[in-house]
Each structure stands twice: as structure tokens, then as C-alpha cells.
Amino acid sequence: MIHFQGKSRTHGKDGNFSGRSYRFHHDGNDASSNYGGRRKIVVVFIMACMAVLVGRAIDLQVLNKQFLKDQGDMRHVSEVSVSAYRGMIKDRNGAPLAISTPVESIWMNPQQIEPGKEGEIRQAEKLLGLPKGKIRESIKADAHRQFAYLARQVSPVVADQVKALKLAGIYFEREFKRFYPAGEVSAHLVGFTDIDDVGQAGLESGYEKSLKGIPGSKRVIRDGQRRIIEDVENIKEPVDGKNLELSIDQRIQYLAYRELQLAVNLHKAKSAALVVLDAKSGEILAAVNQPSFNPNTRKSLKESLYRNRSLTDVFEPGSTVKPFVVAAALDGGYVKPNDIFETHGVYQIGSHVVKDVHNYGTLDLTGVLKKSSNVAVSQIALSMPPEYFWRSYHKLGFGVASSSGFPGEASGSLLDYQHRSDFETATLAFGYGLNTSALQLARAYTALADNGILHSVSLFRRDEDVDQQRVFTAKTAKRVRAMLETVLMKDGTAYEGRVDGYSAAGKTGTVKKAGAGGYIEKSYFSVFAGMAPAKNPRLIVVVMVDEPSAGQYYGGIVSAPVFSKVMAGALRVLGVAPDQQDNMPILLTRGDS
């Protein structure tokens, strides 16, 4: 204890000091005792705190360690989606028509981009092909957001170069990009996907659920900047999409595409469509269109370009349906094989007149098809009961969707027999008053090619046609097929359609296009439908050229040559042996002249 003694000074009234005296001394025993007590208190307090901390550490790290793990996981472990491979689309021989390749998409969190990284940011812009300053502009524009894409579907090589810059706030996500090896050749069939790999047209759209697969998921560890640094575990494996195996033969598809493109350019046509069918199975071996598009580069793509005209567009088939009229009349006994028809070039039906291009005079059944007489075929049609005639067309699939498996395929139209006049029945006999697609017309020809058996059609490979049905007797089908061989003879309407090395049979069609107020002058569909080899057809080819404008418009001149080249090439691709030697092409060797 401390004691004080001394003097205290104060100011007096006169300014002098006055005060008291003080003394002090130290009581050593009392001070030492007080200091030791305080130190003990501090030590005890510190030891108590340490005990609490040790106890808490033991509690968290030993007794209740899951708590810390859970807290850490909430901050650094997260669940992410794992993309599934989209199924391939392949032709009948396994050639790829649509495949997916892994790519990366790059995005940023604008709130995490560090200042002072201008060099790295500019380098990233160069690698990604972005304008200078684009990233900084995006940061300002999206400052309130935590997500903004910088680039989609970047190649892994470029993505790795951007990763090497180690920019905070820049993230990477694996995706898949669709690639179409066949390009324009099969574009209308296959279609395409959008930037998110979702089908937008063609088979890609129609079979989206089957192709896209089911995404999986996994747990990952992220660093403080939310970048994935380690995979922890797979939660659910992705299920890859199913592959589509088409009936298409890409070799024939390419051949058909090339020849159709040449014809459109040569005749300055508006558009065109072509279908190749297997006459025995109904499988679609080729379906091509003009104009086309490249599904790998779809900038400024118009819907009119990716419409699959061969399966979705309809037209009046014209004289290509005349063989069915003759077959129906023969099967029903309404005409005989040796019947004769007087044509005279015109045929009066009420107040209407049916005309032929020329006065063909007297024709037998073969001549009716060979010369394509409207007058004679009108007489044949009117000899049949209206319902029977209508059902003959209906059984061939006119007015009914062909169910090929392509989304949005056309069903066409066929006016009911109860609402038709005699003149309308006559025009129906030479292909006016009904609408059909190229595919539907090709399907109808299977009934002639396969001895009276009408086949269903399919875009997918199959071993047999379980839906085939008989519509004509085999005898009638063979008889009509023989008549159609004469169409490709020198005095027929399709001499340009003959096939080198093979017998062939077919029918031309030249059809005026319908407009708002009736039929349009000098505007035509040029059509040809045929099969080969004629004695035992393997293939059917239908060609439709819309509005040829280079002077020629007859089906025998515009479309028949396309049939000839495609049929000859396709039969050789399939290894079908030639059956006609007199029209084999002559190959000259050196020294020949």
C-alpha cells in the first residue's frame, strides 16, 4: 500500500504560493500480494479459453466433423449436368449423315472480372474472334448479372488457349456441336439443330426425343472463383441418344442430287424434287431437292430452302397417272386388252372439250399410253363406275399420307367421287383434280413394278414390308408395264428416258400449274415416273421439275433425261446386272475411231 506525505501549494491573493507538506512510503507486502492474484486470474482465464477452444475443435473435428464438411461442401462442392451424346443419323450402309463433336462454350460472371487484366482480356478476344473491347462492353452491359456468354461451341484447342490465360470470372462448359458430313446432299432429309443442339427441321426435329438422350450429373469441387478444379463423383451417368439408321443409300443420294441440280440449272427451273424407291421393299433410297442449303453454315437461312419438297410439297401429277386408269379398267373388266379407241384429237363432254396435242386417230391400249392420249383415257375412265374409279386411286395411296416416317409429309388430296361431274372424272384420268407428292407417286408405281403389290414406304431400313397389299392382279400389272416400255421407244413421249444397258418403263407428265384464277399459261410441272429393269423392276424413280423456263417444258424432255442418268447409275451402284445389250454404251479403246 502506498502512503503519501508532502505539501500542497496554492496561489494566494497576492500571487505567492502557499501550501502544505506531504510525505509518502511504499507498503511492499500489500502490492506483491495484489499483483499475484491478478496474474492468477488472467492465467486461469486464458487456460479456460484454451480448454473451450480445444473442446470445440474436438467437437467439430472428431465428434461432429460432418458439420464442417457440410459447410465446406456448400461453398465448394456443387452438382453439375453432364451432357449426353446426341444420336447419330446414318445411311443404310453406316455412312454418317449427322454426328456430334465435343466443343466448349465460354461464359463469364461480369462481377468477378478483375481490373488490370487488359492484356489477357484482349488476348481472349483475339482467340475468340471478338471485336476489341467487346468483353469490357459486355461487363458494363451485364454488370448486374452473374452470367453472360462470350462464345458458343468453341473448338477444344481454342478453349484450352483461353483457359491458359487464367482470367478470373471466365468459365467453360462442355457442349456438343452437330456436324453434317453430307452437307447439301442430304440436308432436306436430315435437317439441323440450333445452337443448343435441339432439332429444328427434318429428322433432327421429328426424332428429337429419341436423338437427344438423357443428361447425367456429377459432383465437382470448385475453387474460390467457382472454377471446377476436381470431379468428386458421378451421380447419374448420361444416356446417349439413339442412332437413326435410314433406308437412304448415300451413294444414290449423291448421284440423284447431282443430276437434279444439273437439270435445274440447264432448264432454269424454279425448283425440283426426286425420289428413288426400292420396288421390292418400299424403302426410300434417295430423296433430293433443289434448291438446297448447307446445314453446317446456316446464316440467313430461309424456310423455303429447307422445305423437303419431295415429301412435303404436292402437285397435280398429270399423265403419270394414266397407267393406273388402264390397269383399273383391265382389272375390272371395263376394257379388254385388244380394245380400240377412236380419238380424233377432241372429245366433247357436255359443254366441255378434252383435247390431245395431236390427232392420234385410232389407238389400242398400248398406243393410249405410248402417245399419252387424253381423249382415249377419258373414254376409259367414263366407262367405269365413279365409285370404282375413285377407289382405284384411293387404294394406290392418293389422298392419304404415305407414313414414311418424315415429319410433316404431305397427304395430298383426292376429290370424292360423289362430288364429281363427268368432265371432272375425265380430267382426273389425266392427272388434274388430285394432288400428290413425288413420294406418293413413286409409291403408287410399286403396284405396277411389283406385279400388283402396293408397298408401304419407309425412311428407315427394314428387312420386309409387313404392310404391303395387292391392288392389281399380277397379270394386269405385267401387261401395263409392257405397255409403258413403249413410252421410252423412239416414237414414244420419253425417248430421252431410256436407260443404258437396261430395259425401262415409265410415263411422262406435263402439267399446267394452277393459280388463283385458274391454270397459268406457260407455267408447268415437268414430271416423269419410271422403273427398271422393266421385266423385273428393282428401282422406281420419280422426277418433278417446277417451272422450267429455258424453252422446253415437256416431261419427256426435261425430267426423263434425269430419270435415265439416275436410274443407270443407281442400278450399277446396287450391282444389278444389265438386261439389254442393244443400248449398252460403247466404250472406245485407244486406236478405235
Image: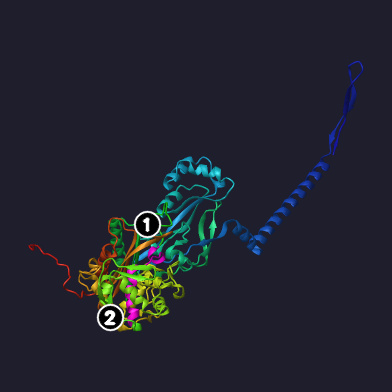
Quarter of the image with the C terminus is bottom left
Confirm whether residue 545 shows in the render: no
Q: Give the quadrant of residue 94.
A: bottom left
Q: Amino acid at mark 2?
A: Asp
Residue marked by disc 2: 339
Q: Which residues are magenta?
A: 308-330
Confirm whether residue 80 shows in the render: yes
Q: Nearer the viewer, residue 467 or 344?
A: 344
| Spot occupied by residue 571 in the image (x, y as percentages of width and height) | 26, 71
- What colour scheme was applied to this rendering of the protein? rainbow
Q: Give the quadrant of residue 267.
A: bottom left
Residue marked by disc 1: 294
Residue lying at 7% horizontally and 62% vertically, measured from the top left: 591
Which residue sits furthest left?
591
Q: Amino acid at mark 1?
A: Asn
Q: Residues within 10 Å of mark 2 (few under 14, many from 20)?
A: few
Of circles 1 and 2, the one toward us is: 2
Q: Nearer the viewer, residue 577 or 47?
A: 577
Vertical relation: 486 (above or below) 79? below
> In the shown orientation, is residue 415 left or right of residue 21?
left
Question: What secondary structure prevails in the magenta region?
Answer: helix
| Spot occupied by residue 506 in the image (x, y as percentages of width and height) | 28, 72
